[in-house]
Image: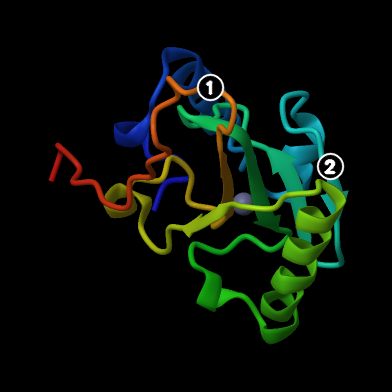
Amino acid sequence: MSLYCFGNVRTERQRAEMERLEAAGVCLFCPEGLAASPGQQVLLATEHWSVTPNEFPYPGTSLHLLLVPRLHATGLLELPGPALADFWVALRAVVESQGITHYGLGVRNGDCRFTGATISHVHAHLLVGEEDDPGAPPVRMRFSSRPADR
Ligand SMILES: [Zn+2]
């Protein structure tokens, strides 16, 4: 399985960044990838998770954060128990520290060619819908894709 799923790219800038990382063999969400990416500032970290803003936020969000495990895994259930349990610690810490009162959570698990994800390293999306802009679209997250090259 490759690190990135180019069929699910949403913007050309995102594609260019993914091509650069794929060529370098760098997983953006592994600790060394996160540390080397200026666009992925770590807002908060627990023993097993880092929280970073999505560099390419979904339309309609006022806040779009990603919870990323330190271990490279393609699905949540590949993580060992302590890392799984620590997810809730990280979620509570970010919700409380950011004063978040409403949000959605979304996680795609498994082969990113089929889940709509752009990267194979599992991560949770914390999505806060825009409150103040009446023209903001509802926040939508895609959970499936079908590779054209099958
Ligand atoms: Zn990784």
Q: Amino acid at mark 2?
A: Leu
Q: Which residue is mark 1?
A: 133
Q: Which residue is mark 2?
A: 43
Taking the spot 50% from the left edge, 14% from the top edge, the residue there is 13
Would you call the spot at circle 1 few (<14 residues within 10 Å), some (14-19), or many (20 or more)? few
Secondary structure category for the residue under label 1: loop
Taking the spot 67% from the left edge, 54% from the top edge, the residue there is 68
97 to 11, vertically: above or below: below
- Marking on residue 87: none
Taking the spot 62% from the left edge, 60% from the top edge, the residue there is 72
Taking the spot 42% from the left edge, 14% from the top edge, the residue there is 12
Quadrant of residue 46 in the image?
bottom right
Would you call the spot at circle 2 few (<14 residues within 10 Å), some (14-19), or many (20 or more)? few
Q: Position of residue 84 (x, y in %)?
A: 67, 77
Query: Disc 1 versus disc 2: distance between alpha carbons?
Result: 25 Å
Q: Amino acid at mark 1?
A: Asp
Are the residues flagged by discs 1 and 2 in contact, CB closer than 8 Å?
no
Secondary structure category for the residue under label 2: loop
Colour treatment of the image: rainbow
133 to 91, vertically: above or below: above
Q: Position of residue 102 (x, y in %)?
A: 62, 52
